[in-house]
Amino acid sequence: MSVGGAIVSVPAATADGVESPVADVLWLRWLGLRAYEQVLDAMREQTIARSVDTPDEVWLVEHPPVFTLGQAGRREHLLAPGAIPVVQTDRGGQVTYHGPGQIVVYVLLDLRRARLGVRHLVEALEQSVIDVMADAGVGAVRRDAAPGVYVDGRKLASLGLRVKNGCSYHGLALNVDVDLAPFRAIDPCGYRGLEMTRTRDLGLEWTTLDAGRRLVDALARRLGRSVRAETP
């Protein structure tokens, strides 16, 4: 949903227009293909402007090719970025790659209102991927010392969050049909030689929107929420 190219918020309401309690709903927004910095600015602005009545939102988006460095990101992990831009960002974690064919799930949640700890949110995001993959007949796991989700030792989903004034933004990136070659130009998440995978290589013919909807449904179940959506 956009107005003049700008990302805008919507009220928490059910499909028939009746307002829903903000603490019980995840409002889902599909942003399509958007520049990373545009979405980053929108997340920051939304988080700063939040009030106790602001609905929790989940944004589904794809980005043009970009490498992003987390707060503690070290540039020696950028091995050969070439012409792909590098953006310093404020999430946790090291360096990763975003590009078309990867669905990014940004979670803009009031953690204090939900009485939700950061560790719980991380686990819910990871477990949502594991649940979705299990439903598709693929075994996926998390690693305690390396956030994200893995299949047969290869990384399928990366995770990084930022919490400001008790509210979260950033989130999870799932490789669906993304070109994996750019990951070889970095140490993904700071790990030399870490191999990546994607759902297409696991035999799943999903679109990014298919994968995103599955993830949001799984996350909502984990958080005990309902989803209100305006997606294609």
Image (cartoon, rainbow, N blue to C red):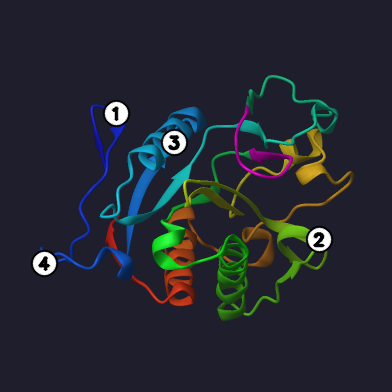
Q: Residues within 10 Å of mark 3 (few under 14, many from 20)?
A: some
Q: Nearer the viewer, mark 2 or mark 1?
A: 2
Lateral position of residue 183 relative to residue 50, left or right? right
Residue 5 is marked as: 1
Q: Nearer the viewer, mark 3 or mark 4?
A: 3
| Residue at the image point whose x is 27% and y is 43% from the top | 1
Q: Which of marks 1 and 4 is in front?
A: 4
In the picture of the structure, the residue carrying the numbered disc 3 is 44
Q: Which amino acid does label 1 sit on?
A: Gly
| Residue at the image point whose x is 68% and y is 60% from the top | 201
Boundaries of the magenta span = 88-97
Q: Earlier in the sequence, mark 4 or mark 2?
A: 4
Between 110 and 25, which is closer to the camera in this rendering?
110
Mark pair 3, 1: CA separation: 17 Å
Q: In this view, does 93 lie above or below 107?
A: above
Q: In this view, does 1 lie above or below 202?
A: above
In the picture of the structure, the residue carrying the numbered disc 2 is 145
Find numbered disc 3 in the image and state the secondary structure of the residue it sits on.
helix
Number of numbered labels in the structure image: 4
